[in-house]
Image (cartoon, rainbow, N blue to C red):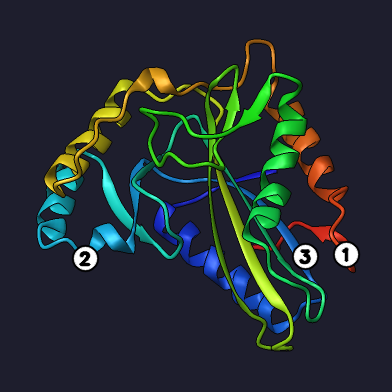
Amino acid sequence: MIETLDTGRALTRELELLDRVSRDPSQRLLWLWQGSQSLVVPRKLAVHPRFTEAQAELSSSGWTVETRATGGDATPQGKGIVNVTHVYALPPSAHFDMDAEYDRLCSPIETALGPRASRGWQPGAFCDGAHNVQLNGLKFAGTAMRFRPSRADRSRVTVMAHALMLFDRPEEHAIAAINRLLSALDQDRVIQIGAHTGLPPGKDPETFCEHLISAFAQLPLPESPTLVEPAA
């Protein structure tokens, strides 16, 4: 159900899945994965003149730093973190609404979490944004998105929606690594461990994933093909 692989390879595979659906909009893919211990940054941070130096410093202490194609901010990967990647094509000539597509991503996570889930900004959280999924008022999942016209049909938009879910509350050394990187890149903010939360006590990870997959499968996506897990 959850594939474990190197974070760099996972980021490459996300783009491969985006290209796959772009070339064949009849597919809709859902992938759950867990990466290796690392930090992931958007390109806007990777162009900083001290990025290579900071990358080497973090790598020497066990934190490789990877670059992703979506926007957002620095995030951790590794133990206690599970990612969900949903790739699909909108119907021909459908209007692309960013908020609506984020709702397609966040709603299944909220459904799987239950009635204490919500959505919104969380001061002190890493990669904070309006489309955080919160649990009991703390950040449980961060979200990001990439989209482009389908190669097979330019009237269709292909969407790759990604969420990083904290099955366990982040460990102190992960938050410390993010703060070291942000400081090295002249980012004027400090991430706080207390802004985050994991799955609630008693919530079995495997059962949660089953509920999550079911919620994605039931999304009201017009003209949507059957949801499948991509083959490796």
First along the sequence among labels 2 and 3 = 3
Q: Which mark is residue 47?
A: 2
Q: CA distance from mark 2 to mark 1?
A: 39 Å
Q: Position of residue 109 (x, y in %)?
A: 69, 37
**Disc 3 designates what residue?**
28
**The disc labelled 2 sits on which kind of residue?**
Val
Mark 2 and mark 1 residues within 8 Å of each other at the beta carbon = no
Say which of 108 and 59 sits in front: 108
On the image, which quarter does residue 136 sit in?
Answer: top right
Mark 1 and mark 3 residues within 8 Å of each other at the beta carbon = no
First along the sequence among labels 1 and 3 = 3
On the image, which quarter does residue 49 sit in?
Answer: bottom left
Q: Position of residue 219 (x, y in %)?
A: 84, 50
Q: Position of residue 81 (x, y in %)?
A: 50, 35
Q: The residue tagged with tag 2: helix, strand or loop?
A: loop
**Label 3 neighbour load within 10 Å: few <14, some 14-19, many 20+:** many
Above or below: residue 14 compared with residue 177? below
Q: Position of residue 137 (x, y in %)?
A: 55, 19
Q: The residue tagged with tag 3: helix, strand or loop?
A: strand
Say which of 63 and 176 sits in front: 176
**Disc 1 designates what residue?**
222
